[in-house]
Amino acid sequence: MLSKTSSALAGALSAAMCLFAHSQAEAHAVCGNRIFPATLGIDDPGVNDELALPTVTYIPPNTGGTQEFDASFSYTKTIFPNFGLSITDGKTWLNPGGNGWGNIDTELKYMFWCDAPHEFMASVGLDVTWANTGTKNFSDPFNTFTPLIDMGKGFGDLPTSLNILRPFAITAELGLSIPSAPHTSSIVYDDSGNPSLNVALNPTVFDWGFTLQYSLPYMNANVSEVGGPDFLRHLVPITEFAFQTPVSNYAPGGNVTTGTIQPGAIYMADTWQVAVEALIPINGASGHNVGAVAELHFFFDDIFPNSLGKPLFQ
Amino acid sequence: MSRLSMSRIAASLAFVLVASAALAHAQLQKAIPAVGGTVTASPKEIRLKFSEGVEPRFSGIALATEAGATEPIGKPGVDPADNSVLIAIVSEALKPGTYTVTWHAVSVDTHKTQGSFNFTVAP
């Protein structure tokens, strides 16, 4: 079974790679002296030609005894400079519980502000998770529309007397996930085979999060030389905070904020990066054990500057 | 996962990595005088080592005192032996004090980057 599903995933990944090879496609979220790396818990504020493949997540057994493993990809193509479309999908394995693909997710995003001297950038986007595009029982039968805003601020503009703080940057994301259907009905059967109608509310959820990052590459280039092995000059220690708060149409007692705190590190090479973070649930409703997430990320504007890595329309 | 599928994915990723070998944003890796460093005598040149080759026609270096006054330096050029090294001659001996180097670079694949850093000439 595992071999069969893995082959399906492999086939999908190969197909995705072929698709990229036949399409036309900037990477790094760069504003002034600052390069914001791609982050895992929330999106970065840039619009780039990039590929995250794979993003893998492990969530250890929760109170129900189910452990989870996810593998996903995300590809972003710039249409115009600073305006791009991304597509994301992934597969989940539950043990026990089987496996399946989630709904396909797309996002249109526009980076509308870069204040280079102050290393501040912001973008707006509309994310849509499309109904019934995944495996039954692993995907929702309704669309979810999420308008969102992403921001990033580097602190390189602090006075040199605060040099130690200048490599810091923060990014943040705010979004509102609005389901297209207020509730989902399904027929469930009890142990005796008697059917009953189950109605689940689909709440509107406020998605919010931020990251705190300390860029050693920034320090090495703009503040003071970073000694030691070259490895250190590519490292960005980071902690991400990603939360979800139901704000309307939730079941009684269902407005509990869930989320994770994600300490980790990002290694930034010239054309790719790899990130590894822990997933620490903030409360019992978010989980009971520490998981992990990792991602390999390719910057297509650097890898294919004259083809896949540039906007379709300049 | 079948061996064939794994091979295809590995080959695809290897292609991406190989294709990336010579292209990227030019990021400052090392500078002479050193970023944030102190020198005991006026430097004769500003030497910036980037992660990628740079185009000297579209790249620049400026030098200023702590008060913001511009210090004259020569037109930057690349090291004939290494196009990832941008060099500008310091025209006049620098007095003791703190100086700011501001640079911008266009890599050989046309990506733009910029940065600035201080160094100090000790009394």
Image: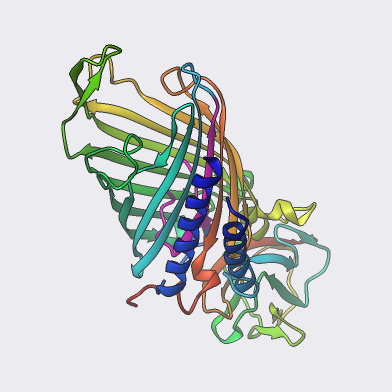
Q: Which residues are magenta?
A: A35-60
Residue A237 seen in the figure? no
Compared to residue B6, the image places residue A303 above or below, namely below
In the displayed image of the protein, which residue is found farthest to the front? A192
Looking at this view, is A291 or A131 the one in front? A131
Q: Viewer-proximal residue, A239 or B37?
A: A239
**Percent position (x, y) of residue A111?**
34, 59
Quarter occupied by the C terminus of chain A: bottom left
Q: Residue furthest right?
A: B40
Is residue A47 magenta-colored?
Answer: yes
Q: Is residue A75 left or right of residue A128?
A: right
Residue A95, x across and y down, in percent: 50, 28
- What color scheme is it? rainbow
Q: Is residue A13 visible?
A: yes
**Can you say whether B60 is above or below B12 in the image?**
below
| Residue in the picture at 29% in, 33% down | A206
B97 with respect to A93 (left or right):
right
Q: Across the whole image, how many numbered discs are drawn on residues?
A: 0
Across and down, in percent, residue B6 comes to: 60, 57
Front residue of A60 and A175: A60
- Tell me the residue at 58%/68% (across/down): B16
* Residue B96 versus residue A244 in the image, above or below: below
User: Splitting the image into 4 quarters, where does residue A311 fall?
Assistant: bottom left
Q: Position of residue A11 (x, y in %)?
A: 48, 57
Q: Residue at 74% x, 88% y: name it.
A: B80
Q: Is residue B15 magenta?
A: no
Q: Is residue B89 above or below residue A23?
A: below
Q: Residue at x 45, y 56 (%)?
A: A12
